[in-house]
Image (cartoon, helix red, strand yellow):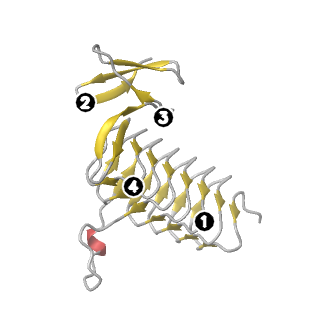
Amino acid sequence: MENDYFVHTSSVVDQGAIIGKGTKIWHFSHVMPTAIIGENCNIGQNVFIDNKVEIGRGVKIQNNVSLYNGVIVEDDVFLGPSMVLTNVINPRSFIERKSEFKPTYLRKGCTIGANATIVCGVEIGAYALVGAGAVIIRDVPPFAMMVGNPARQKGWISKTGEKLLFDDSGKSWCVAEKKWYSLAEGTVSELS
């Protein structure tokens, strides 16, 4: 029976892995047996997807990314080239710590830039943007723009990736979306 997804001949998808319709898995990648990948994802070259990793629909994972046990990726997330996810806070090669894996949540529509590092146990909020090379050590609110090491918030960003500039009333207009956003008590929300 033909698959309704594409796997390059150099890649390995272990039996039991669930791969959604329209997904493409490119060169030298490895998907473990209990991984779940949604529909219409694009998995770049040299990507490792561990057991118990869940990936939503429309996710783009660029080259050289490893997703370890405990990572949950919601729909429409972008993972830049060579960005890093961890799953243990204090690893030692001589101590088994599989019982200490900490879950990491990448919420809908967030973007993680090239070479960024996400320390395990954090949540990256919906539509947040983590800049290239940033090191995330704590939760990131939805729509936040984070840069640096350790990462600091440098503003807010819309669903389409436009910088939001809030006025004194706490409102910002996104030209690309033709939509208003509001900022109240450190939380951004879309206005209908």
Q: Position of residue 81 (x, y in %)?
A: 51, 58
178 or 134, nearer to the observer? 134
Proximity of marks 3 and 1: CB atoms separated by less than 8 Å: no
Q: Which residue is mark 2?
A: 186
Q: Quadrant of residue 183?
A: top left
186 or 153, nearer to the observer? 153
Q: Quadrant of residue 98?
A: bottom left
Amino acid at pointer 2: Gly
Inter-mark Cα distance, 3 to 4:
18 Å
Amino acid at pointer 1: Gln
Residue at 60% x, 60% y: name it. Answer: 19
Which sits earlier in the primary sequence, circle 2 or circle 1? 1
Q: Quadrant of residue 62?
A: bottom right
Q: Position of residue 109 (x, y in %)?
A: 48, 41
Which sits earlier in the primary sequence, circle 2 or circle 4? 4
Which sits earlier in the primary sequence, circle 3 or circle 1? 1
Q: Which mark is residue 45?
A: 1
Amino acid at pointer 3: Gly
Inter-mark Cα distance, 2 to 4:
25 Å
The residue mark sitting in front, 2 or 3, is: 3
Q: Which residue is mark 4?
A: 133
Inter-mark Cα distance, 2 to 1:
38 Å
